[in-house]
Protein backbone atom coordinates (compact mmCIF):
# COMPACT_ATOMS: atom_id res chain seq x y z
CA UNK A 1 0.00 0.00 0.00
CA UNK A 2 1.42 3.41 -0.89
CA UNK A 3 2.07 5.90 1.84
CA UNK A 4 0.31 9.24 1.50
CA UNK A 5 2.18 12.21 2.79
CA UNK A 6 1.22 15.80 3.40
CA UNK A 7 2.34 18.34 0.78
CA UNK A 8 4.96 20.84 1.85
CA UNK A 9 5.93 24.27 0.73
CA UNK A 10 9.39 24.09 -0.79
CA UNK A 11 11.98 26.64 -1.66
CA UNK A 12 12.53 27.67 -5.25
CA UNK A 13 14.84 25.63 -7.40
CA UNK A 14 17.25 28.49 -7.60
CA UNK A 15 17.73 28.67 -3.84
CA UNK A 16 21.23 27.84 -2.69
CA UNK A 17 21.53 24.45 -1.04
CA UNK A 18 24.17 23.13 1.36
CA UNK A 19 26.78 20.95 -0.26
CA UNK A 20 27.82 17.41 0.66
CA UNK A 21 24.79 16.78 2.84
CA UNK A 22 24.54 13.19 1.71
CA UNK A 23 27.05 10.52 0.64
CA UNK A 24 28.45 11.09 -2.82
CA UNK A 25 26.98 14.55 -3.17
CA UNK A 26 28.58 17.25 -5.24
CA UNK A 27 27.75 20.93 -4.97
CA UNK A 28 25.20 21.93 -7.58
CA UNK A 29 25.30 25.64 -6.96
CA UNK A 30 27.61 27.91 -5.04
CA UNK A 31 30.65 25.80 -4.02
CA UNK A 32 31.52 28.23 -1.24
CA UNK A 33 28.45 27.35 0.80
CA UNK A 34 29.67 25.78 4.02
CA UNK A 35 28.63 22.29 5.00
CA UNK A 36 26.36 21.72 7.98
CA UNK A 37 28.09 21.43 11.31
CA UNK A 38 27.02 20.26 14.72
CA UNK A 39 25.38 23.26 16.34
CA UNK A 40 26.10 22.26 19.92
CA UNK A 41 28.54 20.17 21.89
CA UNK A 42 25.67 17.80 22.56
CA UNK A 43 25.22 17.31 18.81
CA UNK A 44 28.93 16.54 18.53
CA UNK A 45 28.67 13.93 21.29
CA UNK A 46 25.70 12.39 19.52
CA UNK A 47 27.67 12.20 16.28
CA UNK A 48 30.56 10.60 18.17
CA UNK A 49 28.19 8.01 19.63
CA UNK A 50 26.90 7.20 16.16
CA UNK A 51 30.37 6.71 14.68
CA UNK A 52 31.22 4.16 17.38
CA UNK A 53 28.61 1.80 15.93
CA UNK A 54 30.56 1.20 12.72
CA UNK A 55 33.60 -0.55 14.29
CA UNK A 56 31.38 -2.24 16.90
CA UNK A 57 29.30 -3.74 14.08
CA UNK A 58 32.40 -5.69 13.01
CA UNK A 59 32.54 -7.61 16.29
CA UNK A 60 29.86 -10.26 15.52
CA UNK A 61 31.96 -11.79 12.73
CA UNK A 62 35.01 -11.65 15.00
CA UNK A 63 33.15 -13.44 17.77
CA UNK A 64 31.69 -15.99 15.35
CA UNK A 65 35.10 -16.93 13.94
CA UNK A 66 36.79 -16.93 17.32
CA UNK A 67 34.20 -19.15 19.00
CA UNK A 68 33.60 -21.60 16.13
CA UNK A 69 37.33 -22.17 15.81
CA UNK A 70 37.78 -23.11 19.48
CA UNK A 71 38.62 -26.66 20.54
CA UNK A 72 35.23 -27.14 22.23
CA UNK A 73 33.40 -26.44 18.94
CA UNK A 74 34.80 -26.97 15.43
CA UNK A 75 38.47 -27.05 16.49
CA UNK A 76 39.72 -25.08 13.47
CA UNK A 77 42.81 -23.08 14.59
CA UNK A 78 43.03 -20.81 11.54
CA UNK A 79 39.39 -19.76 12.03
CA UNK A 80 39.97 -18.93 15.69
CA UNK A 81 43.14 -17.03 14.75
CA UNK A 82 41.21 -15.01 12.17
CA UNK A 83 38.63 -13.96 14.75
CA UNK A 84 41.33 -13.24 17.31
CA UNK A 85 43.11 -10.98 14.83
CA UNK A 86 40.07 -8.70 14.68
CA UNK A 87 39.97 -8.37 18.45
CA UNK A 88 43.74 -7.77 18.47
CA UNK A 89 43.37 -4.84 16.07
CA UNK A 90 40.34 -3.08 17.54
CA UNK A 91 42.29 0.17 17.83
CA UNK A 92 42.86 0.23 14.08
CA UNK A 93 39.21 -0.62 13.39
CA UNK A 94 38.05 2.24 15.60
CA UNK A 95 40.47 4.65 13.89
CA UNK A 96 39.12 3.81 10.44
CA UNK A 97 35.47 3.56 11.44
CA UNK A 98 35.33 6.79 13.45
CA UNK A 99 37.20 8.79 10.79
CA UNK A 100 34.88 7.49 8.09
CA UNK A 101 31.80 8.15 10.21
CA UNK A 102 32.85 11.70 11.10
CA UNK A 103 33.52 12.65 7.48
CA UNK A 104 30.40 14.51 6.35
CA UNK A 105 30.35 12.79 2.96
CA UNK A 106 31.71 9.52 4.43
CA UNK A 107 34.54 9.32 1.92
CA UNK A 108 37.10 6.51 2.07
CA UNK A 109 39.95 9.02 2.21
CA UNK A 110 38.94 9.82 5.78
CA UNK A 111 39.19 6.15 6.76
CA UNK A 112 42.62 5.93 5.12
CA UNK A 113 43.73 9.01 7.06
CA UNK A 114 42.45 7.43 10.29
CA UNK A 115 44.55 4.35 9.61
CA UNK A 116 47.66 6.42 8.88
CA UNK A 117 47.11 8.45 12.03
CA UNK A 118 46.75 5.33 14.16
CA UNK A 119 49.97 3.78 12.83
CA UNK A 120 51.89 7.01 13.47
CA UNK A 121 50.40 7.52 16.94
CA UNK A 122 50.84 3.93 18.10
CA UNK A 123 54.36 3.40 16.78
CA UNK A 124 55.56 6.88 17.76
CA UNK A 125 54.34 6.63 21.34
CA UNK A 126 55.82 3.14 21.77
CA UNK A 127 59.17 4.32 20.41
CA UNK A 128 59.30 6.77 23.30
CA UNK A 129 57.93 4.35 25.89
CA UNK A 130 57.69 0.66 24.84
CA UNK A 131 55.26 -0.11 27.69
CA UNK A 132 52.53 2.13 26.25
CA UNK A 133 49.39 0.41 25.02
CA UNK A 134 46.68 2.93 24.14
CA UNK A 135 44.37 0.27 22.74
CA UNK A 136 40.97 1.42 21.51
CA UNK A 137 41.52 4.94 22.84
CA UNK A 138 44.43 5.38 20.43
CA UNK A 139 42.09 4.47 17.59
CA UNK A 140 39.44 6.87 18.86
CA UNK A 141 41.94 9.76 19.04
CA UNK A 142 43.25 9.02 15.53
CA UNK A 143 39.76 8.69 14.08
CA UNK A 144 38.57 11.95 15.60
CA UNK A 145 41.62 13.82 14.32
CA UNK A 146 41.31 12.35 10.82
CA UNK A 147 37.58 13.06 10.62
CA UNK A 148 37.97 16.64 11.80
CA UNK A 149 40.85 17.34 9.41
CA UNK A 150 38.94 15.77 6.53
CA UNK A 151 35.93 18.01 7.06
CA UNK A 152 38.17 21.07 7.34
CA UNK A 153 40.67 20.49 4.53
CA UNK A 154 39.20 18.08 1.97
CA UNK A 155 38.84 20.91 -0.58
CA UNK A 156 42.16 22.61 0.19
CA UNK A 157 44.00 24.18 -2.77
CA UNK A 158 47.82 24.04 -2.77
CA UNK A 159 50.30 25.87 -5.01
CA UNK A 160 50.58 24.48 -8.54
CA UNK A 161 53.85 22.68 -7.83
CA UNK A 162 52.15 20.85 -4.92
CA UNK A 163 48.72 20.54 -6.51
CA UNK A 164 48.94 16.73 -6.62
CA UNK A 165 48.81 16.67 -2.82
CA UNK A 166 45.81 18.98 -2.58
CA UNK A 167 42.21 18.10 -1.80
CA UNK A 168 41.57 14.71 -0.21
CA UNK A 169 45.19 13.58 -0.75
CA UNK A 170 46.19 16.21 1.79
CA UNK A 171 44.18 14.58 4.61
CA UNK A 172 46.41 11.53 5.35
CA UNK A 173 49.44 13.81 5.31
CA UNK A 174 47.89 16.30 7.71
CA UNK A 175 46.62 13.50 9.94
CA UNK A 176 50.05 11.89 10.04
CA UNK A 177 51.66 15.16 11.11
CA UNK A 178 49.00 15.83 13.73
CA UNK A 179 49.26 12.31 15.16
CA UNK A 180 53.06 12.56 15.20
CA UNK A 181 52.75 15.55 17.49
CA UNK A 182 50.19 13.67 19.57
CA UNK A 183 52.53 10.64 19.74
CA UNK A 184 55.27 12.82 21.21
CA UNK A 185 52.87 14.12 23.86
CA UNK A 186 51.37 10.73 24.65
CA UNK A 187 54.75 9.08 24.79
CA UNK A 188 55.51 11.20 27.84
CA UNK A 189 52.09 11.67 29.49
CA UNK A 190 50.16 8.50 28.63
CA UNK A 191 51.47 6.45 31.58
CA UNK A 192 49.98 9.09 33.89
CA UNK A 193 46.71 9.13 31.89
CA UNK A 194 46.60 5.34 31.93
CA UNK A 195 47.00 5.27 35.70
CA UNK A 196 44.02 7.63 35.98
CA UNK A 197 41.94 5.46 33.63
CA UNK A 198 42.94 2.34 35.54
CA UNK A 199 41.96 4.00 38.82
CA UNK A 200 38.49 4.83 37.44
CA UNK A 201 38.19 1.36 35.95
CA UNK A 202 39.18 -0.33 39.20
CA UNK A 203 36.66 1.82 41.05
CA UNK A 204 33.85 0.93 38.64
CA UNK A 205 34.72 -2.77 38.68
CA UNK A 206 35.49 -2.79 42.40
CA UNK A 207 32.24 -1.06 43.30
CA UNK A 208 30.52 -4.38 42.68
CA UNK A 209 26.74 -4.42 42.62
CA UNK A 210 26.45 -0.65 43.05
CA UNK A 211 28.54 -0.02 39.93
CA UNK A 212 26.65 -2.68 37.98
CA UNK A 213 23.29 -1.18 38.94
CA UNK A 214 24.33 2.37 38.03
CA UNK A 215 25.75 1.22 34.71
CA UNK A 216 22.62 -0.76 33.83
CA UNK A 217 20.32 2.18 34.59
CA UNK A 218 22.47 4.73 32.75
CA UNK A 219 22.85 2.40 29.78
CA UNK A 220 19.09 2.57 29.21
CA UNK A 221 18.48 6.18 30.22
CA UNK A 222 21.15 7.43 27.79
CA UNK A 223 19.51 5.51 24.96
CA UNK A 224 17.32 8.45 23.97
CA UNK A 225 20.39 10.59 23.29
CA UNK A 226 22.51 7.88 21.69
CA UNK A 227 25.26 8.56 24.24
CA UNK A 228 24.99 5.06 25.71
CA UNK A 229 27.46 4.03 22.98
CA UNK A 230 30.09 6.27 24.58
CA UNK A 231 29.46 4.75 28.02
CA UNK A 232 29.59 1.24 26.57
CA UNK A 233 32.91 1.91 24.84
CA UNK A 234 34.64 2.60 28.14
CA UNK A 235 33.05 -0.38 29.91
CA UNK A 236 33.57 -2.85 27.07
CA UNK A 237 36.95 -1.77 25.71
CA UNK A 238 38.79 0.38 28.26
CA UNK A 239 38.20 -0.47 31.93
CA UNK A 240 40.09 -3.44 33.37
CA UNK A 241 43.24 -5.25 32.18
CA UNK A 242 44.02 -8.87 31.36
CA UNK A 243 46.96 -10.54 29.64
CA UNK A 244 45.69 -13.36 27.44
CA UNK A 245 46.87 -15.28 24.35
CA UNK A 246 46.70 -12.08 22.27
CA UNK A 247 48.63 -10.06 24.87
CA UNK A 248 47.32 -7.25 27.06
CA UNK A 249 43.65 -6.45 26.53
CA UNK A 250 41.30 -3.91 28.09
CA UNK A 251 37.58 -3.79 28.78
CA UNK A 252 34.92 -6.24 29.91
CA UNK A 253 34.14 -7.49 26.38
CA UNK A 254 37.75 -7.94 25.32
CA UNK A 255 38.71 -9.60 28.58
CA UNK A 256 35.79 -12.03 28.43
CA UNK A 257 36.73 -13.37 25.00
CA UNK A 258 40.43 -13.40 25.94
CA UNK A 259 39.59 -15.82 28.74
CA UNK A 260 39.55 -13.55 31.81
CA UNK A 261 37.49 -15.45 34.44
CA UNK A 262 36.54 -12.16 36.13
CA UNK A 263 35.03 -10.57 32.99
CA UNK A 264 31.43 -10.67 31.80
CA UNK A 265 29.62 -9.10 34.76
CA UNK A 266 28.84 -5.92 32.80
CA UNK A 267 27.21 -7.89 29.96
CA UNK A 268 25.50 -10.88 31.58
CA UNK A 269 22.59 -8.91 33.02
CA UNK A 270 21.39 -7.71 29.62
CA UNK A 271 20.42 -11.20 28.41
CA UNK A 272 17.32 -11.60 30.65
CA UNK A 273 16.13 -8.14 29.61
CA UNK A 274 16.69 -8.35 25.86
CA UNK A 275 15.83 -12.02 25.30
CA UNK A 276 12.88 -12.21 27.68
CA UNK A 277 11.84 -8.92 29.31
CA UNK A 278 11.27 -6.71 26.29
CA UNK A 279 9.56 -9.43 24.21
CA UNK A 280 7.21 -9.82 27.20
CA UNK A 281 6.60 -6.07 27.08
CA UNK A 282 5.56 -6.48 23.44
CA UNK A 283 3.11 -9.20 24.45
CA UNK A 284 1.69 -6.93 27.14
CA UNK A 285 1.25 -4.06 24.68
CA UNK A 286 -0.47 -6.40 22.23
CA UNK A 287 -2.82 -7.82 24.88
CA UNK A 288 -3.77 -4.32 26.08
CA UNK A 289 -4.28 -2.88 22.59
CA UNK A 290 -7.78 -1.99 21.45
CA UNK A 291 -9.46 -5.01 19.81
CA UNK A 292 -9.83 -3.19 16.49
CA UNK A 293 -6.09 -2.35 16.45
CA UNK A 294 -4.61 -5.72 17.43
CA UNK A 295 -4.24 -6.89 13.84
CA UNK A 296 -2.44 -3.67 12.89
CA UNK A 297 0.04 -3.70 15.78
CA UNK A 298 0.43 -7.46 16.11
CA UNK A 299 2.89 -7.95 13.26
CA UNK A 300 4.88 -4.88 14.28
CA UNK A 301 5.21 -6.00 17.91
CA UNK A 302 5.97 -9.59 16.92
CA UNK A 303 8.73 -8.44 14.59
CA UNK A 304 10.23 -6.15 17.23
CA UNK A 305 10.08 -8.92 19.84
CA UNK A 306 11.85 -11.40 17.56
CA UNK A 307 14.55 -8.86 16.70
CA UNK A 308 15.18 -8.25 20.41
CA UNK A 309 15.18 -11.98 21.22
CA UNK A 310 17.47 -13.06 18.39
CA UNK A 311 19.82 -10.09 17.92
CA UNK A 312 19.48 -7.98 21.07
CA UNK A 313 18.44 -4.87 19.11
CA UNK A 314 15.84 -3.29 21.37
CA UNK A 315 15.33 0.30 20.19
CA UNK A 316 12.14 -0.37 18.15
CA UNK A 317 10.48 -1.65 21.33
CA UNK A 318 11.87 0.94 23.73
CA UNK A 319 11.05 3.92 21.54
CA UNK A 320 7.49 2.66 21.13
CA UNK A 321 6.77 3.40 24.81
CA UNK A 322 9.60 5.70 25.88
CA UNK A 323 7.67 8.93 25.31
CA UNK A 324 4.07 7.84 25.68
CA UNK A 325 4.86 6.12 29.01
CA UNK A 326 8.10 7.54 30.45
CA UNK A 327 7.30 5.98 33.84
CA UNK A 328 7.42 2.56 32.18
CA UNK A 329 10.76 3.40 30.62
CA UNK A 330 12.09 4.40 34.04
CA UNK A 331 10.94 1.05 35.43
CA UNK A 332 12.63 -0.66 32.48
CA UNK A 333 15.90 1.14 33.24
CA UNK A 334 15.76 0.13 36.91
CA UNK A 335 14.95 -3.48 36.03
CA UNK A 336 17.97 -3.52 33.72
CA UNK A 337 20.22 -2.39 36.57
CA UNK A 338 18.66 -4.99 38.88
CA UNK A 339 19.25 -7.71 36.28
CA UNK A 340 22.98 -6.94 36.22
CA UNK A 341 23.07 -7.17 40.02
CA UNK A 342 21.08 -10.44 40.14
CA UNK A 343 23.28 -12.11 37.54
CA UNK A 344 26.37 -11.01 39.43
CA UNK A 345 24.99 -12.37 42.72
CA UNK A 346 24.45 -15.69 40.92
CA UNK A 347 28.12 -15.56 39.77
CA UNK A 348 27.16 -15.51 36.09
CA UNK A 349 29.86 -14.41 33.66
CA UNK A 350 28.49 -14.06 30.14
CA UNK A 351 29.48 -11.88 27.20
CA UNK A 352 28.47 -10.79 23.74
CA UNK A 353 30.09 -9.34 20.65
CA UNK A 354 27.24 -7.04 19.61
CA UNK A 355 24.25 -7.28 21.93
CA UNK A 356 22.58 -9.67 24.35
CA UNK A 357 20.45 -11.69 21.95
CA UNK A 358 20.10 -15.43 21.40
CA UNK A 359 22.82 -15.48 18.73
CA UNK A 360 25.42 -14.05 21.09
CA UNK A 361 24.14 -16.23 23.93
CA UNK A 362 24.83 -19.37 21.92
CA UNK A 363 28.23 -18.11 20.73
CA UNK A 364 29.50 -17.07 24.15
CA UNK A 365 27.94 -19.86 26.22
CA UNK A 366 31.04 -22.04 25.94
CA UNK A 367 33.16 -19.33 27.56
CA UNK A 368 30.58 -18.45 30.21
CA UNK A 369 30.38 -19.26 33.88
CA UNK A 370 26.94 -20.46 34.97
CA UNK A 371 25.59 -19.16 31.66
CA UNK A 372 22.56 -21.45 31.95
CA UNK A 373 21.25 -19.20 34.74
CA UNK A 374 20.27 -16.62 32.11
CA UNK A 375 17.32 -18.86 31.18
CA UNK A 376 15.56 -19.17 34.57
CA UNK A 377 16.32 -15.53 35.38
CA UNK A 378 14.96 -14.65 31.95
CA UNK A 379 11.77 -16.60 32.65
CA UNK A 380 11.28 -14.58 35.84
CA UNK A 381 11.92 -11.37 33.92
CA UNK A 382 9.40 -12.39 31.28
CA UNK A 383 6.75 -12.61 33.99
CA UNK A 384 7.88 -9.35 35.64
CA UNK A 385 7.80 -7.32 32.42
CA UNK A 386 4.50 -8.78 31.29
CA UNK A 387 2.86 -8.19 34.66
CA UNK A 388 4.25 -4.69 35.23
CA UNK A 389 3.54 -3.47 31.70
CA UNK A 390 0.02 -4.92 31.67
CA UNK A 391 -0.82 -3.46 35.08
CA UNK A 392 0.62 0.00 34.37
CA UNK A 393 -0.83 0.33 30.86
CA UNK A 394 -4.33 -0.50 32.10
CA UNK A 395 -4.08 1.31 35.43
CA UNK A 396 -2.70 4.58 34.04
CA UNK A 397 -4.17 4.25 30.53
CA UNK A 398 -0.81 4.68 28.81
CA UNK A 399 -1.25 5.23 25.07
CA UNK A 400 1.10 2.48 23.94
CA UNK A 401 0.89 0.92 20.46
CA UNK A 402 -2.67 -0.02 19.66
CA UNK A 403 -4.16 2.35 22.25
CA UNK A 404 -3.23 5.66 20.57
CA UNK A 405 -5.60 6.37 17.65
CA UNK A 406 -3.37 9.00 16.04
CA UNK A 407 -0.34 6.69 15.90
CA UNK A 408 -2.31 3.74 14.55
CA UNK A 409 -4.52 5.66 12.14
CA UNK A 410 -1.79 7.94 10.80
CA UNK A 411 -1.56 5.97 7.55
CA UNK A 412 -5.33 5.93 7.09
CA UNK A 413 -5.64 9.64 7.82
CA UNK A 414 -2.84 10.43 5.38
CA UNK A 415 -4.35 8.30 2.63
CA UNK A 416 -7.67 10.11 2.84
CA UNK A 417 -6.34 13.45 1.65
CA UNK A 418 -2.82 13.06 0.25
CA UNK A 419 -1.18 11.75 -2.92
CA UNK A 420 0.63 8.39 -2.93
CA UNK A 421 4.38 8.50 -2.46
CA UNK A 422 6.35 7.12 -5.43
CA UNK A 423 8.80 5.12 -3.31
CA UNK A 424 9.59 4.45 0.33
CA UNK A 425 12.38 7.02 0.16
CA UNK A 426 10.06 9.59 -1.39
CA UNK A 427 7.58 9.03 1.43
CA UNK A 428 10.18 9.79 4.08
CA UNK A 429 11.48 12.81 2.15
CA UNK A 430 8.03 14.35 1.95
CA UNK A 431 7.33 13.54 5.60
CA UNK A 432 10.52 15.37 6.55
CA UNK A 433 9.34 18.51 4.80
CA UNK A 434 10.60 17.93 1.28
CA UNK A 435 14.01 17.92 -0.34
CA UNK A 436 14.83 21.55 0.43
CA UNK A 437 14.13 21.06 4.12
CA UNK A 438 16.66 18.22 4.56
CA UNK A 439 20.15 19.43 5.40
CA UNK A 440 21.81 16.16 6.40
CA UNK A 441 20.61 12.58 6.81
CA UNK A 442 22.47 9.52 8.09
CA UNK A 443 21.69 6.20 9.76
CA UNK A 444 22.62 5.00 13.24
CA UNK A 445 21.79 1.36 14.03
CA UNK A 446 17.98 1.61 14.11
CA UNK A 447 17.50 5.36 13.56
CA UNK A 448 17.67 8.00 10.88
CA UNK A 449 19.43 11.09 12.24
CA UNK A 450 18.22 14.09 10.26
CA UNK A 451 19.21 17.74 10.35
CA UNK A 452 16.48 19.94 8.88
CA UNK A 453 16.03 23.64 8.20
CA UNK A 454 12.65 23.73 9.92
CA UNK A 455 11.45 21.08 12.30
CA UNK A 456 7.87 22.34 11.91
CA UNK A 457 7.75 21.09 8.32
CA UNK A 458 8.42 17.50 9.44
CA UNK A 459 5.22 15.90 10.74
CA UNK A 460 5.29 12.96 13.16
CA UNK A 461 2.07 11.34 11.84
CA UNK A 462 3.43 11.45 8.29
CA UNK A 463 6.72 9.87 9.41
CA UNK A 464 4.83 7.11 11.20
CA UNK A 465 2.71 6.63 8.09
CA UNK A 466 5.94 6.21 6.13
CA UNK A 467 7.00 3.41 8.50
CA UNK A 468 8.58 5.04 11.57
CA UNK A 469 8.09 3.40 14.96
CA UNK A 470 8.79 6.63 16.84
CA UNK A 471 10.09 10.16 16.29
CA UNK A 472 12.54 11.88 18.66
CA UNK A 473 13.34 15.60 18.51
CA UNK A 474 16.54 16.35 20.50
CA UNK A 475 16.46 19.96 19.24
CA UNK A 476 14.42 22.19 16.96
CA UNK A 477 16.33 21.32 13.80
CA UNK A 478 17.40 17.74 14.62
CA UNK A 479 15.11 14.73 14.27
CA UNK A 480 15.69 11.06 14.99
CA UNK A 481 13.35 8.69 13.17
CA UNK A 482 13.27 5.21 14.71
CA UNK A 483 12.59 2.61 12.02
CA UNK A 484 14.43 -0.53 13.16
CA UNK A 485 17.37 -2.49 11.69
CA UNK A 486 16.53 -1.36 8.13
CA UNK A 487 17.77 2.16 8.95
CA UNK A 488 20.95 1.87 6.86
CA UNK A 489 19.07 0.63 3.79
CA UNK A 490 16.43 3.35 4.08
CA UNK A 491 19.09 6.05 4.55
CA UNK A 492 20.86 4.86 1.39
CA UNK A 493 17.58 4.96 -0.56
CA UNK A 494 16.76 8.46 0.68
CA UNK A 495 20.22 9.84 -0.02
CA UNK A 496 20.21 8.28 -3.50
CA UNK A 497 16.87 9.95 -4.28
CA UNK A 498 18.08 13.26 -2.85
CA UNK A 499 21.20 13.07 -5.00
CA UNK A 500 19.28 12.17 -8.18
CA UNK A 501 16.63 14.86 -7.65
CA UNK A 502 19.12 17.60 -6.85
CA UNK A 503 21.32 16.59 -9.77
CA UNK A 504 18.33 16.77 -12.11
CA UNK A 505 17.39 20.20 -10.74
CA UNK A 506 20.95 21.46 -11.29
CA UNK A 507 21.20 19.98 -14.82
CA UNK A 508 17.68 19.95 -16.32
CA UNK A 509 18.91 19.46 -19.88
CA UNK A 510 20.96 16.38 -18.95
CA UNK A 511 18.04 14.94 -16.97
CA UNK A 512 15.70 15.31 -19.98
CA UNK A 513 17.92 13.33 -22.35
CA UNK A 514 16.86 9.75 -23.15
Image (cartoon, rainbow, N blue to C red):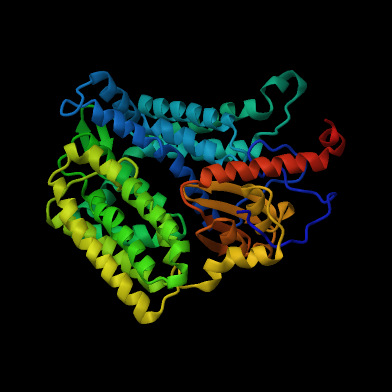
Residue 271 shown left or right of residue 164 in the figure: left
Q: Residue furthest right?
A: 509
Percent coordinates x, y for residue 251 in the rendering:
28, 42
Q: How many marks?
A: 0
Q: Residue drawn at (33%, 31%), measured in percent from left and top?
A: 62
Q: Residue 74 is drawn in which quadrant?
A: top left
Q: Residue drawn at (24%, 57%), measured in percent from left and top?
A: 212
Q: Nearer the viewer, residue 34 or 184?
A: 34
Q: Nearer the viewer, residue 442 or 315?
A: 315
Residue 223 shown left or right of residue 499 in the figure: left
Q: Residue furthest bottom?
A: 395
The quadrant of the rendering that contains the C terminus is top right
Q: Residue drawn at (41%, 50%), measured in percent from left and top?
A: 229
Q: Nearer the viewer, residue 260 or 435?
A: 435
Is residue 251 something one can see in this rendering?
Answer: no
Residue 433 shown left or right of residue 16 in the figure: left
Percent coordinates x, y for residue 24 in the rendering:
66, 35
The quadrant of the rendering that contains the N terminus is bottom right
In the displayed structure, 373 sits above or below 72; it is: below
Percent coordinates x, y for residue 43 in the rendering:
55, 55
Is residue 305 something one can see in this rendering?
Answer: yes
In the displayed structure, 52 sits above or below 322; it is: above
Q: Residue drawn at (83%, 50%), measured in percent from left and top?
A: 13
Q: Nearer the viewer, residue 281 or 188?
A: 281
Percent coordinates x, y for residue 297 in the rendering:
45, 62
Q: Residue 315 is drawn in which quadrant?
A: bottom left
Amino acid sequence: MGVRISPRATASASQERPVNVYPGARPATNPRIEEPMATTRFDAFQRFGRTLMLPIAVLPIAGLLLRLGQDDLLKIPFMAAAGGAIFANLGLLFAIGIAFGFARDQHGAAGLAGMVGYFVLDAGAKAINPTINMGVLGGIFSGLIAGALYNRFKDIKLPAWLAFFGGRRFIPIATGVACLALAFIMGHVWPLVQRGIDAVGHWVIGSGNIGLFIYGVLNRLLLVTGLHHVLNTFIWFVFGNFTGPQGLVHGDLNRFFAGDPTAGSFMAGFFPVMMFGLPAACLAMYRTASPENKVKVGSLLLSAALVSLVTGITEPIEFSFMFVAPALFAVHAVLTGVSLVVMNLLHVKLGFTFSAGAIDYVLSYGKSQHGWMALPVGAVYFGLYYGIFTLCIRRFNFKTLGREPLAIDAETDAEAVLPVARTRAHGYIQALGGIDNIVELEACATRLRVSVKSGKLALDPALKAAGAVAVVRPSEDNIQVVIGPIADAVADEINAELHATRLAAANPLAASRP
